[in-house]
Structure formats: C-alpha cells, structure tokens
Image: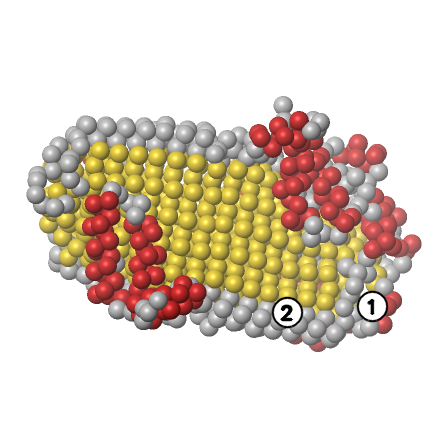
Amino acid sequence: MAYSELEIPDRADHLWRYTPWHRIHPSGKVSEVPEAQGTIIDLTSLDGSTEPGGISLEVATPEDLERLCINGKEDVSTQFIQALSAGNTVVLRVARNARPSQPVLLNIECQGDISALHLLLDIGDMAELELITRISGDAAWAGILRQGIFGNGSHVNDIVINHMGDGRLLRTDGIHLGRDSQIRSGSIGSGSSRCKADLRYTMDQIGASLKVNGSILSLDGMHNDHHVEILHIAPQTYSRLDWHSACAGKSRTIGTGMLRVEAGAKGADAGQLFHNLLLSKEAEADSIPELEVSENDVVGCGHGTANGPVDDEQMFYLKTRGFSEGEARDMLVAAFLNATLTDMGSESVHEHLLEILTRDLAADLSI
Amino acid sequence: MARTGGFSVSSDAREAVGDYKAGWHDPEQATVRFDAGLSEQVVRDISELKGEPEWMTDIRVKAYHHFMARPMPTWGSTELLNSIEFDKICYFLRSGDGTKGDWDEVPEDIKNTFERLGIPDAEQKWLGGVTAQYESETIYHSIREDLESQGVIFLDMDAGLREYPEIVKKYFCSIIPYQDNKFSALNTAVWSGGSFLYVPKGVHVELPVQAYFRINSENMGQFERTLIVAEEGSSVSYIEGCSAPTYSTDSLHSAVVELIAMPGAYIRYTTIQNWSDNVYNLVTKRGVAHENSTIEWVDANVGSKLTMKYPAIILKGEGAHGEVISVAYAGEGMHQDAGAKVHHLASNTTSKILSKSITKDGGRGSYRGMVQVAKKAENCKVNVVCDALILDEESRSDTYPTMEIANPTCRSEHEASVSKVSDNQVFYLMSRGHSEQEALALIVNGFFEPFTRELPMEYAVELNNLMALEMEGSIG
C-alpha cells in the first residue's frame, strides 16, 4: 500500500507512543512527501586495503524490489522512505559462498535538508561476512530503509553505526533470515538529535539464529527511540536481544521490543533484555519489552529490563585505585556500552568499534 | 466445592451446572427492574430511586455523557470489547426490599443462593464483616460489634452516601475521576451498591471484611462502587468474591474501587474473581498511598469471558510501598487481560509486582503493566516479575510491560518468562507414585504458590482445589 493510502499511526500503538509520526516526519505535515536528495555511498574493506571480493553495489531491478521488499507493506515509515527514494533503490549483493577476507565497510553520507536511501540486502546462501554500515553527514533529516534476505546458511555480522550530526534520523530495517543462517545484528548510536529506528527480523526458515545487540549513547537533548521486533515463525529458531543504553544530559532513550512466537514455531528459544544506565538527573529511559507467545512447545521465552544509576560501590572501588570521579565514571560507562559491543563481531571488528566508542565518549560525554 | 475460595456448594448444585460450580441461577425476584438500555433518563431514575443528593446526580449525568462520547479502547481485546451490546443490558435491578442486618430477613431465594455459596458460614468462622450484593443492590450487611464500637464504618455504598455524605463527597471520584476511561465513566453514571469502609486513625481491623457479588439475572449489568479509607496508622484487609450463572447471553460487570491509605496505614484488597464465562469484567481499581503507608492488591482472575483489570497504586507519600500479586487462569473462550500499574511520585517509595498466568484450551492470558518513576522521586525501587505457563498448542500468552524511569537514582527490574510444564518435573513426580494428572496439578499449584500463600487458608485451599479441577483433562 502506498504511503498516501496508509492511516497515520495512533499513539496508543506502542511503536509510536514516544515518537509520534509527526515528530519524525521531515516537515511534521504528515500528508507531505517532500523531495529528497540521495546519499553518497561508498563500499570498501575495513582497512581500505582491498576491494571487497564477491560484493557489489548495484541499482536495484524490479525483480530485486519484488523479491527483497518483503516486510513493511503497511508500515508508515517503510512506505514513506520508499516514496522518498522512488527510483533510486540500491542493492548490496553478496555472492553465494562469498567470504571476504576483511570486514566490509559501507559508508552512507547524508547531506542537504532531506536525504533518503532505500538499500536492499541480497546476501547469498552460505556467504560469510562482517558488514559495518556507517551513517554520517550533516543532513537535517535522513531516512534509511534496509530490506532484504540473509541467505540460507549465511553467517553475517551486520553492524549499523549512527554517526549523524545534529539532524534527525529515521531508520527502518526489514530483514528475513534464511534457513540455518546465523546473524548478529548490532546497532551503535551516538549521533542525531532525534532517532527513530524500527528494526524487524523475520525467522520463517527452520534453524535460523539471531543475536541483536544495541549500544546507544544518548547525550544532551538527544531522543533515541529504538523498536526491535523479532518474529519466530519456523521451528527451531533462536534469538537473543541485548540492548544497552547510557543516557546523559537531558536525553531520553526508549527501547521497545516485540518478541512474537507464532503457533508452529516449535523449539523456539527467545529472550530479550534492555539495560538502561541513567547518568544525569534530567535523563529519562523507557522500556517496553513485549512478548507474545502462541506456541507452548518452546525451549523458553523471556524478557527483562533493568534501569539504574552508575553503581556506587564500583565507583568507590575505582576511586580507591586512584581514579578521579570523572575517570571512574567514564570507565564504567565504557564498560557498560562495551558489554554489547563485544558480541557484535570478530575481534578486529570489536577493536574498530571500541575505538569509535572511546572517541565518542572522550569527545561527547566529557564526564 | 465451589470455584470461589472458602465456600462450598452442595453436590446437587454441582450436578446442575457442570464444570462451572457457581453457574446455577434462581428465579428472578425483581421488585424494580429497569428496561434494557442506557439513557440520561435511566441515570437520573437510578439516582432518584436512591434519593441521592443533587451533586451525585450531577456527577452521574456528566459521567453518562462522557461515556457516550468516549470511544471504545483501541487496545486489548478490541473484538470482544466491540461485541458488547450496551443496549441489551439491564442497568438496574432491585431484588428484595433493601439491605438487611439480620440473615433471617433476607428473601428465601436469595438466602439460598448465598448459603449455597457458603457466605453465612464463612462470616461466623473468620470474618469481621460481610456485605452481600445481589444484582444491583446489597441485600445483607453486617459488621462485628467490637469493630463498630471502635468507629469502623462498614456499609454498602448507598447507605454510606446517605449516612456519611461528607466523607463520600470528599473521596468519591478523587482517585478515579469519571473521565479516567470509558468504563469508569459508565460505572460513575450507573453505579449501585458496593462497599464503603472507613477505618479511623490507629484502628487495626484484625479479621478481614468481605463482600460477595452475585449476578443472578440474564443480560445484567453490575456496577458496584467501593471506597475504602484507612486513616493514619490504621490497617484493614478486604476480600471480595464474585460469581454469576452461566447463560448463553452476556452480562457486564464494571466496578470502580478507590482506596485511600493515609500516612502509616495499611490496606490489603483481595479479589477472587470467578465470573462465569459469559461475563465481561471491565474493572478500574486504584489506590493512593500517603507517607509510609502500604497498599496491596491480591488479585485472582479465574473466570469471565473477558477481564480487563489493572489494579493501580499511586505512591504519593515518601516511604510508601505498593504490591500487586496476581494470578490468572484463561481457559476455553476466555481472555484474561490483567496487569498492574504503579506510579512512584515520591522519594524512597518501593513497589513489587508479581504476576502468574496459566492458559489452556485456547485461552489467552495477557499481562499489561506500567511502572512510572517521576523526576522528583529519588531512590525508588521497583521489581516486576511475570511468569506464564502455556498448557497446550491452542493457547496464547502475552506480556506488555512499560517502564518509564525519569529519575537516575531509581533501581528497577523487570523479568518475564513463558514456558510449558517441564517433562522432567512430570516424570519426577510420576516416579514418586503420582498419576500424570496429579503431577500436573501439583506443578500448577506450585506455580501459583507465591500467590496462594498470601491468601487466608480457607481461600488458598479452595483455589488449589479449583486449579486441580481445571487441570482435569489436560493430559492425554
């Protein structure tokens, strides 16, 4: 259904409770589909030394659109970004059995008033790779829609870093996992004044395994709203969600999760955890980890959420070792965010992510 | 044995009603019965019939207009909600001729009903006071003399309004305004009966007081209104039970309960909801806890077609504590959409929510919760635990918790799990000589144990027996 035909979502829907559609729409006039400019995209290996073998960026064909745009037919944000980027859809194609020797870096630079990208992911069967997608730029508003299929038996570490300037970011993912695929999906956020992310994963093939990790640093007046929806349809599927948000200044982080286990998903094993670290009196953290289970023959389904300040005893311990108040706190915040970074990829990817985190903490948190 | 804890039902009654043990009905003995349907005139007529003061009539009329204007909720079981036929419901039915203080004066048929439910027996053994509501009004009421002499007021709400209008006016709609939601508006417009309980400063009511609500007629609406005020340093425990006959048409129960715990007071409100599976149970319950006071909701939902009930606590005073402990059982054709809400408005407040649910035979159990910690509320502690058991392939369990934390000193935890009965546990118990059926019943009772241990013994035993009955046929 086209964007213009969709109903504007109600705030009673948890997905839109904290960031109503008009607050993330570029102009706030929800009936408008403004003109957007494209993004600058660039594909390299992480260290820049080699061309990533077996991977290409192409303009999407109608067949790609038909095959890879599975989710979001009635979703406002999906349809909106599709409308913005009409005719400019790009597909990242990874060949069957491709195994690049280096992690792959996809840079997406968003410029101008309104910038949008519709990116299709076509990951071939049995491919093994680590893909880091870095969203940056000074666009006042950016919309990034990623849709696609991670092929049967593929092993993918798929990490998205939000390094935008002060602009607003609407990010929507609709990913299907192939049979026996093993996917780790990481989100790192320390950019944009307002971010609304809606990440959806569908496991309709037997044996799919998914780990979703989030490491979100919210500063000043930032508003970070992440919704993660994991749908277990096929039997013997596995998912874990671990989301860590540190909130400083007057920022607000929201983590909403929907873990749905449909009838027939026998042997499903699903869990989600949201952790929020509150660093200032003005910060606010909200969590809604939802669970819908319609199958009784499951290994287990659970969720949890925990909120709290920096632990006094840990602070005391570090201070007795000679660290200043600020150093001790920095260290504990870094450790908190690093807990999910470690699970996002290989050692080399972790080192790269840790370097980014350390830089962000030093530049932004200054605590 | 009845499905309501603490009461017994004779074997002939059991045979008559099949699986639901409180499902028989008596011939209707209405002295006043309004035609089905709701209008401003119906609301005014109820108020006039009761001889209410003008301010109450005004609130009722305002609430009626709000109810009519307010749309149905767009969340929860919208399909069932939209199937309620408000025009087919009778909004007021009086049986007998007023509230009696002597059991012998209660009309024979009604007396039989409550005797079959075991109310007079329970009163003599272990209750401090009893209110029995039949259809729209209370037909029997009593309180122990020693409590009365200490200044405890325990009346049906109509009598409370007549005899203590200043107290009722002060607190009525103060915690749950009629604009709160569609069904609190409906209740405020057409309320009738319920309990008014006032405990003076420093008085401890040692024995629980009980209200029992019975719907007897078909297409009936029951809209009781309960107000409990516990003054400074006092304590009270209130228990309510409810049942209805099984009809092929639906009835509606939409109550409003307001609790006020003044500084240092303690209120425990226990509900054993056992409506038949043709009753919509749409209830609003909320309490406000002042400094160092405690409010506890102990809530069992084992009946009804659709229950939507989220007992709430506003922790308004520093050091206040709130607890909600609930269990829900959803069998065939049932949806238990229950939960809890706690609002931490003051510093050093603590709360605990424990929710357990079992679904079976295509039933649906949903936990819907909300915990809010305000910016100025320092050092609050929150703990929420939800556990669900799904016993077959047709059933479903959902958890929708919301945590909104606006103060960094708060420590909050939420955890939930959904699982099936472990084969290993069943095998272990069977290796100790239990049948498969007994093993399942033991596991289920163990699952509910954190709840049942909070109940008076008579209720706990009956709830365990009831769950064992419900588990029959679950295996094989």
Look at mark 2 in the image and give the residue it sits on: B293
The kind of secondary structure element at disc 2 is: loop
Question: Residue A259: x percent and y percent?
Answer: 42, 42
Question: Subunit of mark 1?
Answer: B
Identify the residue at the far top of this view: B476
Q: Which of B342 and A10 is in front in this view?
A: B342
Left or right: where does residue B230 sit relative to residue A71? right
SS label for mark 1: helix
* Image location (x, y in percent) of residue B283: 61, 54
Q: Which of A161 and B68 is in front in this view?
A: A161
Spot the residue most to the front.
A321
- Work out how far the residue at label 2 is from the one at label 1, CA to CA, in angstroms: 21 Å
At a point 15% along the width and 54% down the height, the residue shown is A110
Which image quadrant is residue B323 in? bottom right
Looking at the image, which residue is at 21% across and 65% down? A363
Give left or right: position of B39 versus B25.
Answer: left
Name the residue beneath numbered marker 1.
B147
Q: In which quarter of the image is residue B19?
A: top right
